[in-house]
Amino acid sequence: MSGILYVVGTPIGNLGDMSPRALETLASVDFIAAEDTRVTIKLLNRFEIKNKLISYHEHNRAEKGETILEMLLSGKSCALVTDAGMPVISDPGQDLVKLCRENGIEVAAVPGPSAVITALAVSGLNVARFSFEGFLTVNKPKRREHLEEIKTEKKTMVFYEAPHKLADTLRDLHTALGDRNIAIIKELTKIHESAEFTTLAEVDGKYDGVKLKGEYVIIVEAKSEAQLAEEAAETAPDPVELARRYITGGLSKNEAAKRAAKETGAKKGDIYKLLLNENTADEGGTGRNDR
């Protein structure tokens, strides 16, 4: 009979957040797959847990994934942990979970703290709907593509960022998304936890050249319905100009006005009237009705 892969959440800072069930699982499984064994051994020592550790991270996931799978198929149980928080979120653990699912291995969650949810909870922003965007890549073409995709995102967005990249990320977000309310939350649940509630315009350039420490979560609030409506109005094509293009393309004024009204939300009668008035002015008051 196959073993079970336990996806175990660990504290993101404060060790007091370690759950009794997580401690029991780490102590009882046959081995632990850890992102960084040096970090995990400190956690185990703190709670006086002794168990076998296997390194499983971004750079060895293909090789070690197969090793862990073989051990699970032989009947051994494994606890998957990351350095902090829930595995799989911006973490190579997603590959191991997928591998286990594909091979009929049971996967069980032992929930724990998550920086995404914790940051949203204290942000004070509208978080009824949100999108987790993770780390923006440093690959410039892919970064531009990602930012282009989220320009029209209507949900609040959550990003992770390292301290030495924070200034560039805030600038790029401001350029791509315009001004938004944001929360920048540092070192969640740790002694030096801090939260800054500001806007993208106010922090664009603020941290240039500043040496920062800690890990950051950036929350960018969704645009309000009023903002979205205003932007839509600004970018919407002029209905009469659109109708003119359709007439040039061969449609009658009536059909052109009808199609332009459907595409812009304007009233067909208003568009048609303006087209007739233009025609009357062009022909010295002898406009024709081509209805």
Image: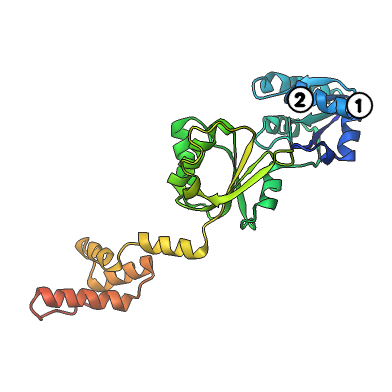
The image's colouring method is: rainbow
State how far apart marks 2 and 1 are (Cα).
14 Å
| For residue 154, above or below residue 111 | below
Relative to 164, is 66 above or below? above
Of 211 and 68, which appears nearest the observer? 211
Instruction: Name the element at disc 1.
Output: loop
The amino acid type, in three-letter code, at marker 1 is: Glu
- The C terminus: image quadrant: bottom left
Residue placed under numbered mark 1 in the picture: 48
Location of the N terminus by quadrant is: top right
Q: On the image, which quarter does residue 271 sit in? A: bottom left
Q: Which mark is residue 204?
A: none
Q: Nearer the viewer, residue 126 or 171?
A: 171
Question: Would you say 288 lies left or right of 245 here?
Answer: left
* Residue 68 at x, y percent in the picture: 78, 23
Query: Is 205 left, or right, of 277 in this rendering?
Result: right
Mark 2: amino acid: Val
Q: 10 Å neighbourhood of mark 1: few (<14), some, or many (≥20)? A: few
Displayed quadrant of residue 236: bottom left
145 on left or right of 242 = right
Residue toward you, 18 or 106: 18
Disc 2: CA contacts within 10 A as few (<14), some (14-19) or many (>=20): few
Compared to 159, does 152 lie above or below? Answer: below
Residue at image position (71%, 31%) is 93
User: Which residue, given by chain and number where applicable, does mark 2 sit on?
Assistant: 39
Examine the image and state in which quarter residue 230 appears.
bottom left
Q: Position of residue 83 (x, y in %)?
A: 73, 30
- Residue 67 position within the rendered picture, expressed as x and y whole percent measured from the top left: 76, 19
Which of marks 1 and 2 precedes in the sequence?
Answer: 2
- Considering the numbered disc 2 on the image, is that residue within a helix, a strand or a loop? helix
For the point 65% across and 52% down, which residue is it? 123
Q: Position of residue 121 (x, y in %)?
A: 70, 52
